[in-house]
């Protein structure tokens, strides 16, 4: 009887496979409503994020979006590269960006994807941005490249490549480590996700009608999710 019990115990131990941790993805669509004429970057970016989240397969996915939160300053506006719109506290209120990043960090994401629309470029294109000097810079560059290539391949948008956030020369928010201009949402001191990319999809003037077409928004969301899934699968295999 003792031998049988031992055998049953060993069999059950061998048969047990620990539950695999589900990948956590955080989406941060732009909350800006003050960019472009007759154009809501918030609405467009959110529609693309919603399309991506609805596309299979499903991960543990969360959206962080300050749009409409009146208890925050710059909840529906503001630049990702300005101290006044990001890290600053105004009348005791934190910014929309700060709130979004607090929410994102609570989810302990494996991947963080910010979605925006560019402006003033005179190009119907898509760009990827990653944080300068990041520990995971190579991985971030690879993912950003995959995502913008997928968007370009599924639409008429030109692929303008992956750039460092330190190259934009915009405004005054700087990374505390490098001292270089950077995107608040991609700063490793603010965002705890190991993988962090920001996509600038289209131009609010040149791509005005294209970006507001629901069919295009759906197409881009699906393309992003499929490229992300493939990258995650390949990464999992390489880490074994």
Image: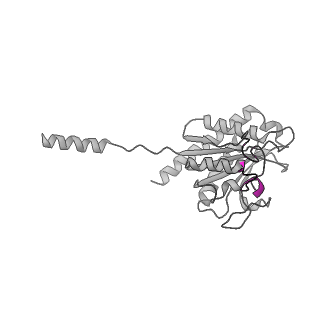
Q: Which residues are magenta?
A: 71-95
Q: How is the image coloured?
A: one colour
* Main secondary structure of the magenta stretch: loop
Task: Pick out the residue farthest to the left.
Answer: 1
Taking 67 as reference, is 240 above or below it?
below
Q: Is residue 122 left or right of residue 136?
A: right
Where residue 220 appears, as percent x and y from the top left, is 69, 39
Residue in front for this viewpoint, 13 or 32: 32
Q: Is residue 153 left or right of residue 227?
A: right
Task: Pick out the residue farthest to the right.
Answer: 37
Q: Quadrant of residue 55?
A: top right
Q: Magenta span has 90?
A: yes
Where residue 79 appears, as percent x and y from the top left, is 77, 52
Q: Residue at x 29, y 45 (%)?
A: 14
Where residue 194 appears, as percent x and y from the top left, is 57, 55
Task: Pick out the residue farthest to the front.
Answer: 91
Q: Magenta span has 88?
A: yes
How many callouts does the rendering have?
Answer: 0
Taking 144 as reference, is 16 above or below it?
above
Q: Residue at x 61, y 48 (%)?
A: 104
Task: Pick out the residue farthest to the top.
Answer: 215
Where residue 65 appears, as percent x and y from the top left, is 68, 42
């Amino acid at each position: 009887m003792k031998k049988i019990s031992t055998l049953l115990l060993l069999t059950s131990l061998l048969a047990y496979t620990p539950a695999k941790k589900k990948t956590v993805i955080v989406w941060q669509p732009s909350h800006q409503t003050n960019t472009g004429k007759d154009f809501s970057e918030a609405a467009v970016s959110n529609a693309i994020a919603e399309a991506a989240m609805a596309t299979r397969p499903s991960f543990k996915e969360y959206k962080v979006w300050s749009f409409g939160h009146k208890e925050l300053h710059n909840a529906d506006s503001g630049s990702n590269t300005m101290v006044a719109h990001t890290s600053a506290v105004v009348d005791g209120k934190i910014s929309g960006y700060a709130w979004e990043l607090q929410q994102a960090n609570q989810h302990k994401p494996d991947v963080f994807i910010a979605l925006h629309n560019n402006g003033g470029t005179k190009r119907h294109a898509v760009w990827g941005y990653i944080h300068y000097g990041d520990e995971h810079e190579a991985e971030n560059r690879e993912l950003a490249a995959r995502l913008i290539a997928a968007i370009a391949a599924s639409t008429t948008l030109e692929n303008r490549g992956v750039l460092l956030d330190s190259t934009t020369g915009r405004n005054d928010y700087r990374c505390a480590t490098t001292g270089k201009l950077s995107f608040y949402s991609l700063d490793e001191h603010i965002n705890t996700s190991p993988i962090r990319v920001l996509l600038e999809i289209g131009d609010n003037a040149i791509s005005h009608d294209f970006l507001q077409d629901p069919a295009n928004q759906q197409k881009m969301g699906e393309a992003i999710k499929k490229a992300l899934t493939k990258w995650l699968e390949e990464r999992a295999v390489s880490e074994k």
